[in-house]
Image: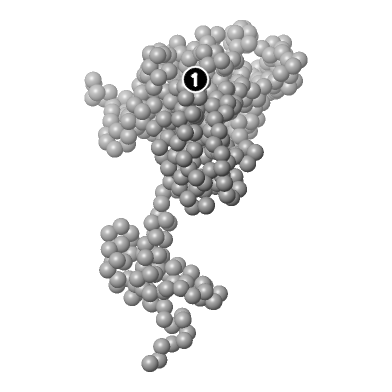
Amino acid sequence: MSVSTNPYRNLPAVNDILLLPSVVALESRYARDVIVEAIRAELSDVRAALAQGQNGVHTPEAIAANVEKRLSADLQPRLRTVINATGIVLHTNLGRAPIAEEAATAAYEAARGYLNLELDLETGKRSSRQNPIRDWVCRLTGAESATVVNNNAAATVIALRALAQGREVIVSRGQLIEIGGSFRIPEIMAVSGATLREVGTTNITRLSDYEKAITPATAALMQVHTSNYRIAGFTESVSTAELVTLGKQFSLPVIDDIGSGALIDFNRFGFSGEPMARDSISAGADLVLFSGDKLLGGPQAGILAGRKELIQRVEKDPLMRAFRCDKMTLAALEVTLRIYMNEEAALRDIPVLRMLGVLLDELKKRATALAKRLRIIETLASVEVVDDVAYVGGGSLPDQQMKTWVVEVKPRAGSDADFAYRLRVGTPAVMARIRDGKIVFDLRTIFPDQVDALVEAVCHVGRNSA
Ligand SMILES: *Cc1c(COP(=O)(O)O)cnc(C)c1O
């Protein structure tokens, strides 16, 4: 009868645990060294707990059960589905635009199989991966040619390199934007090898300011949409058409970075001042740049549309290879653009447009229905339906609010921050707003088919924090 009084000596060895049938079974799912590592980590935690004087059941079976939990938690994908209850339609941290179902299917099919990415099926010869996108962009914007890269930041760099490396580009001081994540026009300009020539002041830039700055070193005139801020009050700026006239006079191309790629008029949603790609082309801009995943509502991409000769120069740039899109993006983008051929279909099938266009009455109805289901949850002290305002996000339309309907809930126990945290780390994760001690769910960005999961998530959090 000599049971050791030293609890460490009763701990099973790694090898003993590895021999348990429940652990052997894990080998069909996890590599052996990953399992060994998890056992060591578990044993080390047990030793630490014992050292602190804690007791517990440390049979091999109990340890094996914890090892299995540990492995399944540790090997969860880090990227997960999030229910966006923030009301921000283009939420950069949540991946910006959710794409159309048909576009997602195209990306899926492209991913899991082969496709004629660089093959002309008619002739059997090699072709450019840019051709399909070029075709649709030209039809939708009236441009002579087009090409696509990974994002609009890349589009800006490659356009400046191809057109202005070693020379000067004139930009208004009112348009030297920072988008966030270190995209600043002066820095992008430096990376591209072009030299920034600033003109005007923050609030006033006249055509004569551009004209006076033109020298033999000038390679282009550039206009940048102030996507994420507005200059209001005593202001003056130059229109695209005026800049184009000046450019023609001096044989200088005009590059127009419009930011969001609006392919339809956003006035229909009550938003003003969002430039459309087609308008910029018809005003005579030589190269128009825009994102695929902002208001266009497609996958992340940077589209360049404009004069054929300039597009050819861009495509010949060695960086094109580094910046080119992959097959999944191209497949999803092509389908997204094709949907725009029919505006009615775009409004219905492109999630960004659908969320911006949903009627307030409909949102109120959805909020009321959600509230009714949440009121049954005992861990909530209050559930209210209220009207509210939200923003488009993604660095678009910064000063323009959108009316919306939300459900506000107040947890009975625990803090609002704790409740929001638990929602965030749940499965599926839920991102909500917090305001005045309440959690706010905005119906605009919650997809109708996510409501069941959302209710379940709130129930679950309530159960665990009560
Ligand atoms: C958003 C934006 C960019 C950057 O576009 P990404 O697609 O995010 O790289 C560049 N210019 C303007 C004006 C923008 O609004």
Q: Residue at x 29, y 72 (%)?
A: 19
Number of marks in the rendered image: 1
Q: Residue at x 63, y 11 (%)?
A: 239
Q: Position of residue 75 (x, y in %)?
A: 40, 54
Q: Is residue 464 above or below residue 384?
A: below
What colour-coding does the image apply? one colour
Along the line of sight, the residue nearer the viewer: 324 or 348:
348
Q: Residue at x 49, y 20 (%)?
A: 361
The image quadrant where one finds the N terminus is bottom left
Residue linked to disc 1: 361
Give the secondary structure at mark 1: helix
The amino acid on which the numbered mark 1 sits, given as a three-letter code, is Asp
Along the line of sight, the residue nearer the viewer: 85 or 32:
85
Q: Position of residue 33 (x, y in %)?
A: 36, 65
The picture quadrant where one finds residue 386 is top right
Q: Residue furthest bottom?
A: 1
Q: Is residue 279 above or below residue 395?
A: above
Along the line of sight, the residue nearer the viewer: 265 or 438:
438
Is residue 176 found left or right of 256 in the rendered image?
A: right
Residue 139 can be seen in this image = yes
Q: Position of residue 313 (x, y in %)?
A: 48, 22
* Mark 1 surroundings within 10 Å by alpha-carbon count, few (fewer than 14), some (14 through 19), many (20 or more): few
Q: Position of residue 66 (x, y in %)?
A: 40, 65
Q: Residue at x 41, y 78 (%)?
A: 11
